[in-house]
Image: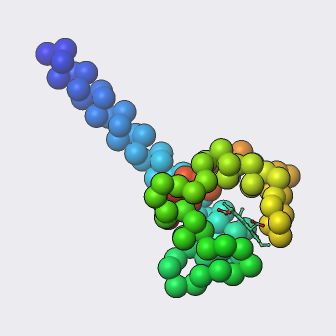
Amino acid sequence: MPCLFLAMLAAEAQGQARASKQQSVQAGQQVFVQRCMQCHSVNADQGVLLGPSLWSEMSRSPHKKTTAQIRVILRDGKGKMPPWKDILAKDDVDNLLAYVRTL
Ligand code: HEC
């Protein structure tokens, strides 16, 4: 039964990947609420606050900005947005990106 065994292992690994992605999205949402929400809305109704609505930015298909471009904006800041490089740990940024990609 080697095939069945491998299939079970693969299913297990997939389940774990899904669980950790879910955790990352949740952690990212918490950081977002603390640090980003005062300037960026994440739903259709709120529109533009101090910064652009990330809902309307992120929900576009194809994506307007790549994940790499967003990383640079977060690191260095842009316009009225402060740079986050001294404030956010790499994990925070990874989690934030996972979260904004769900918008
Ligand atoms: C003080 C208000 C403020 C805070 C806090 C803030 N931002 Fe911004 N953000 C802005 C402004 C203003 C812009 C537009 C900059 C420009 O294009 O000149 C922006 C731009 C962006 C963009 C680029 C959007 C695009 O497509 O052009 C992303 C992504 C982003 N912010 C994410 C975040 C995240 C994630 C956080 C939390 C860590 C955050 N911002 C916190 C004000 C803020």
Going 32% across and 34% down the picture, which residue do you hit? 12
The answer to whether any part of residue 23 appears in the image is yes
| Outermost bottom residue | 45
Tell me if residue 82 comes above or below residue 53 in the rendering: above
User: In which quadrant of the rendered image does the N terminus lie?
Assistant: top left
Q: Nearer the viewer, residue 32 or 58?
A: 58
Going 58% across and 84% down the picture, which residue do you hit? 46
The answer to whether any part of residue 87 appears in the image is no
Q: Ligand 1: give its quadrant.
A: bottom right
What colour scheme was applied to this rendering of the protein?
A: rainbow
Residue 82 in the image, given as x and y percentages of width and height: 84, 64
Going 83% across and 66% down the picture, which residue do you hit? 79
| Outermost left residue | 1
Residue 31: quarter of image = bottom right
Left or right relative to 11: residue 97: right
Left or right relative to 65: residue 90: right
Q: Nearer the viewer, residue 85 or 19?
A: 85
Residue 85 in the image, given as x and y percentages of width and height: 82, 51
Tell me if residue 11 comes above or below residue 85 in the rendering: above
Left or right relative to 39: residue 79: right
Going 65% across and 66% down the picture, which residue do you hit? 32
Query: How many marks overall?
Result: 0
